Amino acid sequence: MRRAYKIGAAVVGVAVVIGVVLAVIFAIPDSTKPEEKELVVTIFHFNDFHAKFEPISSSGGPCPPEGNEKGDCFGGIARLVTAVGRRTLYKNSIVLNAGDNYQGSLLYTLFKYNITLPMMNKFHFDAAAFGNHEFDDKVAGLYPFVDGFNAPLVAANMDASLEPDLDGKFKASEIIYRDGVKIGIVGCITKDTPAISSPEQVKFNDEIEAVKKEAAKLREQGVKIIILLSHTGYEEDKKIAAAVPSIDLIVGSHSHTFLYTGVPPSTDIPEGEYPTVIEHNNGRKTLIVQASAYSKYLGFIQIKFDKSGDVASWEGNPILLDNGVPEDPVTVAELRPWVEEASVIGSVPIGTSAVFLEKETCYNKECNLGNLLADAMVFEYAEIVNDDAWTDVAIALINPGGVRAPMGETSNLTFNDIATVQPFQNMVNTIEMQGKDIIELMELAATPPLYYKRVKSFVGNKGCFQVSGMMATYDFSKPEGSRVVDLKLKCSKCKIPVFEPVELERWYKIAMPSFLTDGSEFPIIPERGRNKTVGRLDTDVTSSYIKSKSPISIGNEGRTKIIG
């Protein structure tokens, strides 16, 4: 049975007030007797931290100067430490991390696991999952973190037997005890990881089958309550919940999904209720929770389990980590040397922007930030000309997952802004592809079986690249594989650049991130492409372009049209 619950107002104020209010709302009755085999647990969780050690703006970008003091910014590691520290107010508390701690800020780009490990160890998690971005720096970049991590790492569908540095460093599940009751925490990670990261010889099996098998093992060991730490995305979590009814709670991640019940405490629009409830034919319920991303929220749910270990009732909502949640002073002091060292590089001015460069819609339609990044790649090769050509590379594309944050919340753009937007250290490469293969590539980006269907941003099974030198029209009312109804490409061997219908057999040179030319996500590119060349680092390419074109005033220009 669900009880009405609202937390938005409760988290405003100083730490003591917040703690007292929450303690009153969620007080666990002392009359709950262990021998009755009922149990109330309080779960704190966060996901997709993405190296947001410093507070973020409302749109997820770097917090502007003075923004934190004005109350315009959210989250950051120091606020998380304060909020998670309130676990001591609750009997039978559990703290969980659902993965993707790596990647997403200049601090990570510069310091990698060296900063991530000590900061994550401050939480003493009861268990944590791997995220796909933990593999972005390959096994060598993950091993030191795993080796020094002070909490159990769980992944039931991951096989690292061919990677000695990781083999034996994690388990399929972890059993913890609360009031003498066994609680099993299973982990899983998206099987798409090899397509979207660099796990080398680590294998990833089907999530549902692996979780089902591990849950059955736990039941055989007398585990009454099963929690799944899932890094697969909200839509996949609902499928797992339906297929494995023995799971009581799924703590999700990967899709950066904001779930909330009632009136949310910010302008963020919930994508579903917190928790999302999956009801089974036998009367059991599986709850699904997720708390957005980037440390803006801390997930908070209290669940009462009956004598059989089934979910009986619950209450909770994500807690907005605004300036009503004080930053832990010890953590602030520990973070300061890292920030000061990074600021030497990050504070370097690059240019200015007269417009806000938005990221939110980049997955499923044209966005002006995507236009900027793609234009920068074409500009990079603009000086390679000959007598019959204005450029050697007239077209470029970028996968929307490579656009990680907005820019332009203040007019001044620094290197920190650019490194936050493009944290993956891709090279801007070129490759030649035939027109017919470019069309197929564009179709693949618009096809839900790929990674995009598993994340929130693939709205209505629609996806697209961010492009320069292209004009594409998609009709999403048509079947998969026939949605690109028109594609025009800008000529390169011409003195007056114009858009021309794509020629199926013609070879075109395209600029794109090394993530794509190396075959991640879209193997068709290296399989069908030829004559790959390696260029400069993407942040250098974007910086050069902004310096040349400031003030930036780019908008949406009809490069991508969506009908149907």
Image (cartoon, rainbow, N blue to C red):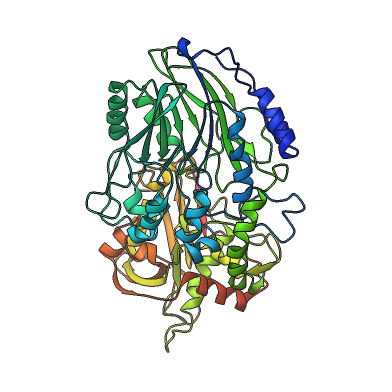
Which quarter shows the N terminus? top right
> Which of these two is toward me, 82 or 540?
82
> Which of these two is toward me, 62 or 111?
111
Direction right: furthest residue: 70
The residue drawn where x is 51% and y is 74% is 540
The residue drawn where x is 63% and y is 21% is 27
Estimate the x, y position of residue 95 in percent, counting from the top left: 51, 36
Q: Quadrant of residue 435?
A: bottom left
46 sits left or right of 339 in the view: left
> Which of these two is toward me, 75 or 146?
146
194 sits left or right of 561 in the view: left
Estimate the x, y position of residue 16 in percent, counting from the top left: 73, 35
> Which of these two is toward me, 371 or 410?
410
Estimate the x, y position of residue 500 in percent, counting from the top left: 44, 68
84 w.r.t. 331: above or below: above
Direction left: furthest residue: 162
Please say whether residue 300 is visible from this viewpoint.
yes
The residue drawn where x is 34% and y is 61% is 140
Q: How many marks?
A: 0
Estimate the x, y position of residue 558 in percent, counting from the top left: 56, 58
